Amino acid sequence: MKKVGVLALQGDFEAHQKALQRAGAEVVLVRTAEQLESVNGLVIPGGESTTMLKLLDAEGLTEPLRRFGRHKPIFGTCAGAILVAAKVVNPEQESLGLVDIEVERNAYGRQLDSHVTRLHAAAPLDGDIEAVFIRAPVILHVGPGVRVLATHRDHPVLVEQGRHLVATFHPELTTDASLHKLFLDKVGNGNR
Amino acid sequence: MHLDETFRIKVGLAEMLKGGVIMDVTNAEQAAIAEKAGAAAVMALERVPADIRKEGGVARMAPISKIREIMQTVSIPVMAKARIGHFMEARILESLKVDYIDESEVLTPADEEHHIDKRAFKVPFVCGARNLGEALRRIGEGAAMIRTKGEAGSGNIVEAVRHMRTIQKEMKQLTVLGREELMAEAKKHQAPYELVEYVAEHGKLPVPNFSAGGIATPADAALVMQLGAEAVFVGSGIFKSSDPEARAKAIVKAATYFNDPAKLLEASEELGLAMPGLDVSKLAESELLQTRGW
């Protein structure tokens, strides 16, 4: 069974934990560097990116997380997408710089502009997925190494770069585990 | 269960706030301090509960200029309080596009019989509760988040503990009952039958359950999280203490590491004085805020 972590500093980490378990993984809630070292892939959940950044910084987890991302897969959703980005605007803030995307926070507006929609995702998913956008960010630009898997209102919302996967929406808030399965396909068994 | 799309989006934002701290602020400066300390959201209000308690008078929705100024200052969600039953304050807050409305017992109730019909709104609502019946009535009306009431502005955790324990215990009790017993339970709790059925089946509320009212220290935050709170609201506890910035940061850390005593010790080191507290058992019935709500 693949062992993956969910960054559990703040946000809907339990929803991700359940989705990953449904997809067949063993899940560790990650709050320390030791816990991070014990897993072969990591989900950074939705929540408040500023809160997570403060805690990462205060707990000395920023560098360990950057190092982790250089060798192992990360799946960032919503706030997680903001954290892994190369550049963040509205307002400008720190990020891990693991995926070559520029992200604008709260780009659809406030909570009243949150919405649910159905999207078509390209191969390997090649099918429709339900996408829940909650005060979601928008991906403004993607670098050359980034593959766009789905778009919504003319912006990429699901992208991959090598081992990493990024969604600006919340697959963990649906009953469809296909994106979590796609992520688990990227995760090794830890025998390296 | 009315799990339609609108309700899912309302609950969705509450999901995002889990493990976080929602801090009461009365102006942009406090909001900036809260955000910098790692608050997951801020709650805009006219006066913090400790001042409402001291100064008395009618407590209303905060001035629009203040709420707007707070919304322009921070990038995290901004909530604002409306009076119980005051659906026009709520309509104004919705037009202002606040992210969540707290139909709150901390403000002076506008209606002593009815709460707001929260399903009629697109903006999500959080409501206070002291027991399961109250929580399920509010959810029945459309609340997408529940917070136990505690006793706001008291700096005393005892009521928050009582309310969280009560709700957890009442939920556990439902899970062991037979189906034929649930209607009598619905009658006893004065709660909608479908919601009683949901709790009996899942052992939890259909919406996130946070804690409020009396949290003044990192240890207080960790205590209510241990008892089942999924996030915490801190009202007077931060800006009525001697060290708002450090305390806000420490409570944020405690909400994340509520199960790690070594980290809680770190969070509790070098803090100044907590807000002054009140012995809730010595308060007159008329001074209690938690009894507001029906």
Image (cartoon, coloured by chain):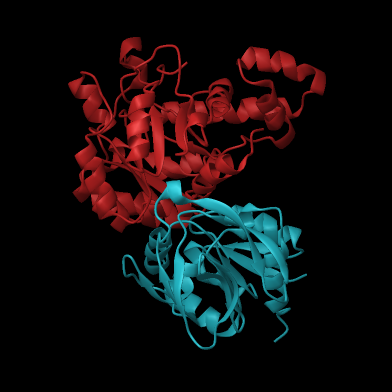
Chain colours: A cyan, B red
Q: Where is residue B142 in the image (x, y as percent from the top left)?
A: 53, 30
Q: In this view, does B20 lie to the left or right of A37?
A: left
Q: Which residue lies furthest to the front in this view?
A: A154
Question: Relative to residue B51, is residue B288 drawn left or right?
Answer: right
Q: Is residue B227 above or below residue A121?
A: above
Q: In this view, does B118 lie to the left or right of B233?
A: right
Front residue of B230/B25: it is B25
The residue lying at 31 percent from left, 50 percent from top is B248
Give the quarter of the figure containing the N terminus of chain B.
top right
- The residue nearer to you, when weighing A62 against B227, is A62
In the rendering, at what x and y percent does residue A68 appear?
Answer: 54, 79
Residue at 47% over, 38% down? B122
* Count of numbered marks: 0
- Residue at 64% x, 13% y: name it: B188
The residue drawn where x is 64% and y is 38% is B3
Image-quadrant location for residue A5: bottom right
| Whether residue B35 is visible | yes
Q: Is residue A111 above or below residue B84?
A: below
Q: In this view, does B98 lie above or below A115?
A: above
Place of residue A142 in the rendered image (x, y in percent of width and height, measured from the top left): 48, 80
Q: Can residue A187 be seen in this view?
A: no
Left or right for B49, reference B195: left
**Residue B187: percent from left, percent from top:** 66, 12
